[in-house]
Every structure is written in structure tokens, then in C-alpha cells.
Image (tube, rainbow, N blue to C red):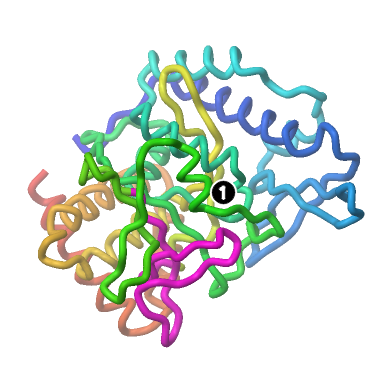
């Protein structure tokens, strides 16, 4: 079975946790900063921000999330203070107990530290298997294979893609990772440039990857000014960084708010890039196809139009996109036929 529906109680628990995290994020950004809520439309999608002036008189914006009825209601009924940590903990425990998928505690420590440092407010996106787990909770299902991993993958659109998350927010990524005290060190590229990947000396499989779209003429690493760091440049990455979504990521005792790709775009992107994996990464390529198949199955059952829209967008980007996508679709069809 590719997925099973979560009981309604679990879906409700997740929705309540996500709502509480959104409230906490709103409170964190605006309780002490008089200003106003504003909407922006980017590439046909509407997003909410809180706009205020800092102590120096500079105009600032806090990203709150894509527009939906739930967020609009939260903003309309906002009260100072937000949700405290004990409430968040209780909600995370309830969601976990009822069947929602959690992440490993050491992984959430890292995600939460980056969130607290402003990584997601500055346009960062959680990608990879952790985003796939988030997609299950968002869609109200538990995947047939949880596909745990030691990798943690993060992304940013860089300067090649206009996304609603772009803001004045900045942080020093190296300082944020060093502040964890977990011993991660930046790996060196083939050209000797350090960055794009942080590794744990005592746990070679424990890796933090930071990714960005590859622009024309760009090589393996690109400097992202918002984070004062080098990111790995990957072809086709921009596809999954459009129409990003707000999601909760959590353990039984902690939770935080992150940005993740739209599940349909996530799946189509996995199919496009599976053929780009090196021979040493064939296991990851198989996992890409398997996760894409699970998402495809959900969309065929619940929202085929969203899947068709993502396919249409990818095919409209040119022959290279179509060739890679068709190769991935063929692999997915083989996998689905075997299930």
C-alpha cells in the first residue's frame, strides 16, 4: 500500500498544531512591532506579511504564509502572546500519538535552530525526505514507507526565481550551524571552495545539504547573500521552489513551522531529477521514484487537476525538461505496476 489515510482525529491534531505554530510565528514577529497585515500576489498566488518599521525607521516585513481561510481567520482574530511552549508540546504529542509522522529529535534540533535564526523567514525551504514526511501530514495520510534518512536538505531560490518569501531578513548560516555545538564542518568542493554541505566527522551519513537553482553559466556552488554562505547549484531546482507551503515539523515534544514545496511540484521534481543521480546515488534515485509514486497515487485519488497542472508546467519548460520528466514517469509506471 502506497499510503493509508490518517484518522480524522490525527488530521485534526495536525491542523491544530500547525495553526498554533502559525499563531506563535505571528506573535513572534508582531507583538512588539506596531504595523499592519498586508497581502502580496506573486505569480498568481497570494501571501500574507506583517509590515512594520524597526527602531531605525526601516520598513520590515515578516512572512506569515500563503493565503487560505484558516490563516486569514488567525490574522483577523490575532491576540498578543501566541501559544506557549507547553501547548505546542501537548499538541505535538497528540499528533504523534494519533499517527502523524514525526522526525528524529536530532534533526528537529537542527531545523528548529535554523528556524529560530530566521532561515525560513529569509526564504529558506525544507526539501528532501523531511519535506516528503511533512507532505503526508499535510495531505492527511501516512506513507507506506516512511523513508527515514540521516540527510537534511534545505534550499533557497537564490536570485534566479521570484518567490513570495524574498525579504530583507538575513543570517550567517555558518554561525547558526556552529551554534548547534554538534560538530558539523563545511565540506570542500572539487574546486576547493568550502560550503554547500556540512558533514559530521563522527557520523559520515549525517549531512546537511543546502541547495539552490543552477543559473546559466553557474557552476557547482553559488553564494547566497541572504545567508552569507555557498549553496550547491542544481539543475531544475527552481521547479520545486514555486508555490511553497507552510507546514509543521515535529517530534513528540517539540515542533516548529517550516516552508516546504507544494506536494505535487515536489513529486514532479523528483521524477525530473531521478535520472541526474550519479551511479553512487542510485539508492536515492529509487527513493525519489518511490516517493513520487506515493504522491502521484494520492493526487490521482484526491486532486488530479493539481497533478496535471504540475505536469503541464514542467512540460512547457522545454525539451530537456520533457525528456527528463518522461524518463522519470516511465520508472514510476514500472514501480506502480509492481505494486
* Residue pointed to by mark 1: 119
Q: Residue furthest left?
A: 338
Can you give x and y, in whole percent of width and height, for residue 169 in the image?
68, 54
Using the rendered view, name the quadrant where residue 76 is placed: top right
Residue 21 falls left or right of residue 300 = right
Q: Which residue lies furthest to the bottom in this view?
A: 217
In the picture shown, does residue 185 fall above or below 41? Answer: above
Residue 48 falls left or right of residue 131 = right
> Which residue is located at x 52 percent, y 43 percent?
114
Using the rendered view, name the quadrant where residue 325 is placed: bottom left
In depth, the one of 83 and 268 nearer the eye is: 83
Give the total number of marks visible in the rendering: 1
Q: How crowded is mark 1: few (under 14 residues within 10 Å), some or many (20 or more)?
A: many
Q: What stretch is highlighted in magenta?
A: 208-237
**Secondary element at image label 1:** loop
Can you give x and y, in whole percent of width and height, for residue 35 in the image?
89, 44
> Which residue is located at x 80 percent, y 29 percent?
78
Can you give x and y, in whole percent of width and height, for residue 287 in the image?
20, 50
In the picture shown, does residue 171 fall above or below 89? Answer: below
Can you give x and y, in whole percent of width and height, for residue 43 in the image?
63, 67
In the picture shown, does residue 105 fall above or below 118? Answer: above
> Which residue is located at x 38 percent, y 13 percent?
97
Q: In which quarter of the image is the C terminus?
A: top left
Residue 326 falls left or right of residue 304 = left
Q: Quadrant of the N terminus?
A: top left
Residue 276 falls left or right of residue 14 = left
Q: Does the magenta stretch include residue 271?
A: no
Amino acid at each position: 500500500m502506497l499510503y493509508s489515510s490518517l484518522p480524522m482525529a490525527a488530521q485534526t491534531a495536525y491542523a491544530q498544531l500547525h495553526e498554533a505554530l502559525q499563531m506563535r510565528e505571528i506573535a513572534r514577529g508582531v507583538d512588539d512591532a506596531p504595523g499592519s497585515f498586508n497581502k502580496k500576489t506573486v505569480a498568481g498566488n497570494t501571501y500574507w506579511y506583517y509590515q512594520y518599521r524597526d527602531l531605525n525607521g526601516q520598513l520590515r516585513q515578516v512572512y506569515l504564509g500563503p493565503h487560505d481561510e484558516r490563516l486569514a481567520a488567525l490574522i483577523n482574530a490575532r491576540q498578543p502572546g501566541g501559544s506557549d511552549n507547553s501547548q505546542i508540546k501537548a499538541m505535538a504529542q497528540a499528533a504523534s500519538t494519533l499517527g502523524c509522522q514525526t522526525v528524529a529529535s536530532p534533526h528537529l534540533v537542527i531545523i528548529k535552530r535554523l528556524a529560530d535564526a530566521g532561515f525560513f523567514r529569509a526564504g529558506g525551504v525544507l526539501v528532501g525526505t523531511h519535506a516528503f514526511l511533512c507532505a503526508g501530514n499535510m495531505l492527511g495520510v501516512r506513507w507506506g514507507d516512511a523513508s527515514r534518512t540521516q540527510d537534511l536538505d534545505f534550499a533557497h531560490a537564490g536570485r534566479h526565481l521570484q518567490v513570495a518569501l524574498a525579504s530583507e531578513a538575513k543570517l550567517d548560516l555558518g554561525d547558526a550551524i556552529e551554534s548547534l555545538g554538534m560538530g558539523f564542518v563545511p565540506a570542500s568542493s572539487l574546486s576547493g571552495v568550502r560550503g554547500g554541505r556540512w558533514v559530521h566527522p563522527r557520523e559520515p551519513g549525517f549531512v546537511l545539504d543546502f541547495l539552490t537553482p543552477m543559473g546559466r553559466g553557474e557552476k557547482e556552488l553559488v553564494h547566497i547573500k541572504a545567508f552569507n554562505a555557498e549553496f550547491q547549484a542544481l539543475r531544475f531546482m527552481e521547479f520545486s521552489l514555486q508555490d511553497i507551503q507552510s507546514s509543521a515539523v515535529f517530534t513528540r515534544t517539540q515542533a516548529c513551522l517550516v516552508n516546504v514545496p507544494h506536494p505535487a511540484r515536489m513529486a514532479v521534481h523528483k521524477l525530473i531529477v531521478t535520472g541526474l543521480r550519479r551511479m553512487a546515488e542510485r539508492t536515492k534515485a529509487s527513493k525519489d521514484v518511490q516517493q513520487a509514486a506515493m504522491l502521484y497515487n494520492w493526487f490521482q485519488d484526491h486532486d488530479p487537476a493539481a497533478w496535471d497542472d504540475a505536469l503541464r508546467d514542467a512540460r512547457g519548460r522545454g525539451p530537456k525538461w520533457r525528456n527528463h520528466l518522461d524518463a522519470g514517469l516511465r520508472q514510476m509506471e514500472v514501480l506502480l505496476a509492481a505494486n
